[in-house]
Amino acid sequence: MPFPEFDPVLIHLGPLPIRWYALAYIAGIVLGWWYATRLVKTPRLWAGGKPPLTGPQLDDLVFWIVLGIILGGRFGYALFYQPQLFGQIFTGSSLGERLEILQMWTGGMSFHGGFLGVVLAVSVFAWRKKINPLNLGDLIAPVVPIGLLFGRLANFINGELWGRETTVPWAIRFCNERILQTYGFCPAGDAPRHPSQLYEAGLEGLALLVILSLAIWSFGMLKRPGFVTGLFLVGYGASRAALETVREPDAHLANLPLGLTMGMILSIPMIIVGLILIVRALKRPVAEG
């Protein structure tokens, strides 16, 4: 199946290109903000009928989270996948090369880096406002799959992060005229590959969103601080680790020990921490309002 002639740029506003990748982040943040607001405005979901913060506090938290996503995602990508970008700050032959680490609009964002950035931002916010960080985690975790869904769809449109070679009927050749004109060749080659971006959008995005929503709205798990956060960590970590088996690893990270990929290595701690949070949450009594 040929790769569609997607243009990563939706529209040009004068000299400013509006990219699908940037719109995916904006859509994820805006819809996530809306969903989190709905959770805050539904007291019956929370232990004691008390949401962890107010509407204005949530608005402030969103600013912190956006900073965590952007800075953590980009610097995490550089740290985990392209550490030479740090060296280019001092050795680059041009200003563009030296500042490439900041060029997030071209792609190159790490979920695990963004996750750590958000954890840091939420932790600092919770400390400053004297709020239980587990309650804040339970508020943020259910909205993350929304951003993951749009982000992976944007990865597909960009023709990046493709899967391994395969012969399944829905395999895609990630090569078209736009890619040829941009690079002069097709980085993914001409072999049919798994559309792993779509698998991730469906599993890490849509499926995980449904699972977390059921835990909240049908089983009342926001009344057990840490459970929803743990469920997200286990769900994302397991999904990502499983899908790494069909996702093409970065060429310079293709021979890691035990046949693992960087995505697997970074996901294993998430699963462990998530299981610990789930067990702890289930052992504690629920404070009904």
Image (cartoon, helix red, strand yellow):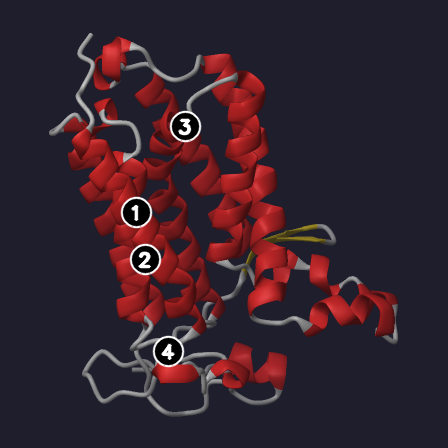
Question: Considering only vertical position in the picture, is 192 above or below 148?
Answer: below
The secondary element bearing badge 2 is classed as helix
The secondary element bearing badge 3 is classed as helix
Q: Which residue is mark 2?
A: 237
Question: Considering only vertical position in the picture, is 171 above or below 146?
Answer: below
Task: Tell me whether circle 1 and circle 3 mark residues in contact (CB < 8 Å).
Answer: no
Do we see residue 107 in this rendering? no
Task: Tell me whether circle 4 and circle 2 mark residues in contact (CB < 8 Å).
Answer: no
Residue kind at label 3, given as amino acid type: Leu
Residue 30, position as x, y percentages in the image = 46, 34
| Quadrant in the rendering for residue 78 | bottom right
Q: Quadrant of the N terminus?
A: bottom left
Q: CA distance from mark 4 to mark 2?
A: 14 Å
Disc on the earlier residue, 4 or 3 = 3
Q: Which residue is mark 4?
A: 260
Residue kind at label 4, given as amino acid type: Leu
Residue 99, position as x, y percentages in the image = 78, 62
The secondary element bearing badge 1 is classed as helix
| Quadrant in the rendering for residue 191 | bottom left
